[in-house]
């Protein structure tokens, strides 16, 4: 079956010879293949598309770019467009050849990649940024029964489940359990109590008893953050009615609920946010991996000559964050342009991200170097950061209208739609 071509804009002709320089291999026919339509890949493609010396192909297995930071909103009544931007919209009028396909093979010798649609695409330079996958750590039942928020589909499945329960049972679940006290678990559990109360009201459920539990295996929430920061977030969640279970390792999930320390917490709504692992593509294709499973890269973000690994996949100090992925995409595009100019590539330096974690409506915790900000001011910083990030991918007007849609709602349920 032919790879589905979503959009083909101008293709640059006349590919020249390859020129290899040592400091980060360079190619002069600049036939660059980018795999992964996420934060890193799209940024790199957009930056390089402005330069006529490059012929850019972007291969992604999804037709859209998932803006993960607002997925918790989409899962709790927000609109889909705030967390999903179609690739053909993003690349309209740009010199980027977009192919929707899953890359499943890499032949380093012949410098080609293979896709699940039977295509073989050759490259001079390859950029791999295919993100992470959920990690259930082999815990029984999680894959089958838990919900997640790793894609729009996940978010909508969860939202539908929350409504369907009310339609069928006419009362909320006994417990809504979010597993994972990292940023995603905090974001989601922070908005769940208010959202559940709101939809119960719409479904005419009087005085509902809502129990939202946040389960974390470490001694405190956000264990990688400073103590003061995680304490402030815990207090905030507590105020919002979230019950926090620390030092609690999940043992299994069954149709009845979640097992922790031999006991079952009754629930049909367990949302797993506790683990991601590197994309298995890299192990399958024999890449050198660090102990955390990410790909070892050199100072130019190369894993092999002319093969770059960026964003969540690379073993760099701050990978695992959208800000880093975006930064990597920009950094690599700049370096490829430098090489095309006949200059040497610059070594990578890791940029410390600003941590912005929302907990409930109009409240965020910020960690900016040594500065910590909480509350409404934090929320304003978060909103500003979203606007800047959308604008990194879209023209200002489009980015602004997407950003302004954050407060709009989009319900999957026939009861809630009427209101
Ligand atoms: C719910 C959630 C909330 C988050 N919130 C924040 C936040 O507030 N701030 C922050 O900084 N970070 C946040 N992150 C982390 C951030 O989203 C990631 O660090 C970022 O997406 C990494 O970008 P990337 O380009 O490396 O990968 P991704 O954005 O994951 O993009 C990878 C792309 O590759 C595609 N792909 C995968 N396999 C293949 C294949 N074999 N062939 C072709 N295409 C493939 C995927 O479909 C995807 O489109 C959040 C993550 C999640 C899950």
Image (tube, grey):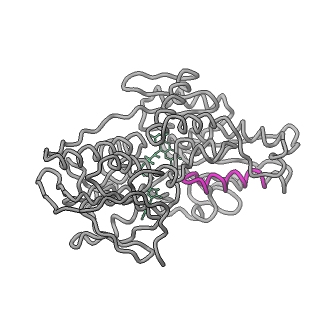
The quarter of the displayed image where residue 77 is located: top right
Question: Which residue is at a point 35% across and 41% down the rendered structure image?
Answer: 327
Q: Is residue 151 left or right of residue 3?
A: right
Which residues lie in the magenta part? 148-164
Predominant SS along the magenta part = helix
Residue situated in front as seen by the camera: 59 or 238: 59
- Does residue 149 show up magenta in the picture? yes
Residue 4 on image: x %, y %: 49, 69
> For this rendering, which residue is in front, 287 or 42?
42
Question: 407 left or right of 354?
Answer: right
Q: Is residue 247 visible?
A: no
**Is 385 or 75 nearer to us in this picture?**
385
State the quadrant of the C terminus: top right
| Numbered marks: total | 0
Q: Report which quarter residue 358 is drawn in.
A: top right
Question: Vertically, is 221 above or below 312?
Answer: above
Q: Is residue 227 left or right of residue 282?
A: right
- Give x and y (percent) for residue 282: 33, 64
Residue 345 location (% of width, % of height)? 17, 45
Residue 319 visible in the picture: yes
Left or right: residue 42 versus residue 259 is left
Task: Residue at 57%, 41% (x, y): give it.
Answer: 70
Please determine whether, in this image, residue 165 is positioned above or below residue 198.
below
Where is residue 99 shown, x and y percent of the image?
Answer: 44, 64
**Is 176 above or below relative to 403?**
below
């Amino acid at each position: 079956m032919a790879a589905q071509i979503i959009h083909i804009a101008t293709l640059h002709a006349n590919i020249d010879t390859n020129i290899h320089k040592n400091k980060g291999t360079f190619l002069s026919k600049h036939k660059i293949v980018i795999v992964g339509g996420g934060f890193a890949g799209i940024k790199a493609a957009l930056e390089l598309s402005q330069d006529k010396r490059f012929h850019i192909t972007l291969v992604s297995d999804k037709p859209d770019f998932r803006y993960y930071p607002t997925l918790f909103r989409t899962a709790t009544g927000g609109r889909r467009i705030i967390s999903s931007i179609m690739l053909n919209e993003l690349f309209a009028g740009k010199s980027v050849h977009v192919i929707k396909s899953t890359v499943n093979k890499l032949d380093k010798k012949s410098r080609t990649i293979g896709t699940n649609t039977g295509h073989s695409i050759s490259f001079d330079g390859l950029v791999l940024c295919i993100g992470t996958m959920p990690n259930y750590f082999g815990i029984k039942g999680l894959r089958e029964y838990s919900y997640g928020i790793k894609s729009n589909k996940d978010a909508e499945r969860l939202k539908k489940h929350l409504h369907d329960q009310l339609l069928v049972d006419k009362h909320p679940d006994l417990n809504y359990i979010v597993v994972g006290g990292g940023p995603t678990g905090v974001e989601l559990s922070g908005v769940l109590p208010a959202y559940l109360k709101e939809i119960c009201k719409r479904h005419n459920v009087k005085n509902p008893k809502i129990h939202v539990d946040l389960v974390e295996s470490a001694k405190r929430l956000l264990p990688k953050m400073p103590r003061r920061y995680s304490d402030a977030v815990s207090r905030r969640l507590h105020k919002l009615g979230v019950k926090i279970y620390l030092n609690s390792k999940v043992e299994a999930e069954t149709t009845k609920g979640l097992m922790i320390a031999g006991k079952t917490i009754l629930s049909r709504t367990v949302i797993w946010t506790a683990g991601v692992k590197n994309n298995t593509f890299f192990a399958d294709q024999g890449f050198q991996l660090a102990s955390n499973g990410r790909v070892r890269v050199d100072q130019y973000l190369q894993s092999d000559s002319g093969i770059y690994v960026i964003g969540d996949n690379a073993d760099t100090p701050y990978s695992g964050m959208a800000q880093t992925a975006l930064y990597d995409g920009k950094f690599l595009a700049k370096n490829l342009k430098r090489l095309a100019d006949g200059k040497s590539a610059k070594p990578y330096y890791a940029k410390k991200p600003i941590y912005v974690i929302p907990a409930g409506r109009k409240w965020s915790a910020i960690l900016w170097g040594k500065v910590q900000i909480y509350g409404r001011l934090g929320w304003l910083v978060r909103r500003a950061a979203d606007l800047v990030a959308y604008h990194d991918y879209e023209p200002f007007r489009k980015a602004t209208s997407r950003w302004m849609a954050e407060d709009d709602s989009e319900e999957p349920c026939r009861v809630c739609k009427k209101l």
